Amino acid sequence: MSFFKKLKEKLTTSTQEVSQKFTEGLTKTRDGFASAVNDLVYRFREVDEDFFDELEDLLIQADVGVTTTMDLVEDLKEEVKRRNLKDPVAVRDALVEVVANRLQEDESDRELNMQDGLTVILFVGVNGVGKTTTIGKLAHQLKSEGRSVMLAAGDTFRAGAIEQLQVWGERVGVPVIRQTEGSDPAAVVFDAVQAAKSRNMDVLICDTAGRLQNKVNLMKELEKVRRVIEREVPNGPHEVLLALDATTGQNAMVQAKAFKEATNVSGIVLTKLDGTAKGGIVLAIRNELDIPVKYVGLGEKIDDLQEFDPEQFVLGLFGDVFEDKNEEALTEKEDTNEDLA
């Protein structure tokens, strides 16, 4: 039994709906990358260096990144040697296991660092990645879990950002602390912290600027906001979540490295994963930055922000394509091999 079939058998009624969201959200990546891997497998009669070279190309095209691709292929070669695998189909299934193993980390790393009292979550990320929308969706999710949530409109520089967050607050039914456009973001966050404390809120989610005159000014502004939170809330902020647009591929990696240096990012929220054929960026982020992917955006609906689940990701990336094509492709391969014999 293949590894991803074993994963499917583990699905419970409660996880089937989540699994479906991952399957639908990863359609573009699956149709591109996973289908290409399948085609590669059935073009080769044996596993050789040409096979691995083409696999490397496919991984890089899926935005897995050169470094992570080399690591994955090296792991795969070791697994092939250890298990004495000869059939490309078996190697393909071993690849699924290698990918899954790369994504596995302590479950606690993926969970939000929720506190008994006030939990402060600081959101960072450049403009246009879906940061404010993601804040609204996360607020909805946390409120649905029975928590009281407040938002802080700390992006006072982008035109319309305050109003956008206000709309989300009204849609979700949570209060928004705001000032006028151009106000000091740190002052807005200070007011929000005091309001959250006085109202005994469970969670305060702070929006921040995504662009100033230059990178240095932006990072200094974020550090100023962070200092205010640290001063007013014990051990705060409890999470610094970086929103990245999955459709930007390796450019997202550049952003992640810059923010990691300046803001001590504790988790990644990968938005618009449903809109790209290069979902391999998830692997690159985990492998090269050692920052857990905590949430992924798998659609435009308010409940399409999902906690990242490595097993669901692997099923969504590989499962249906491999299962749908497996029997037909094996028959074609056997016929081809007979003709060549």
Image (tube, rainbow, N blue to C red):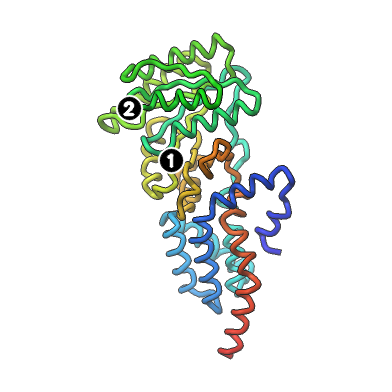
Which one is in front, 76 or 122? Answer: 122
Q: Position of residue 315 (x, y in %)?
A: 62, 54
Give the SS element for disc 2.
loop
The residue carrying mark 2 is 159
Q: Position of residue 125 (x, y in %)?
A: 40, 34
Whether residue 75 is visible, yes or no, is yes
Which one is in front, 6 or 329? Answer: 329
State the residue at coordinates (54%, 60%).
75
**In the displayed structure image, the side of residue 131 where residue 313 appears, left or right:** right
Which quadrant does the N terminus fall into?
Answer: bottom right
Which numbered circle lies on residue 48?
A: none
State the residue at coordinates (62%, 82%).
334
State the residue at coordinates (47%, 15%).
192
**In the displayed structure image, the side of residue 228 where residue 182 appears, left or right:** left
Q: How far is the residue under mark 1 from the one under mark 2?
A: 20 Å
- Amino acid at circle 2: Ala
Give the SS element for disc 1.
strand
Which numbered circle lies on residue 244?
A: 1
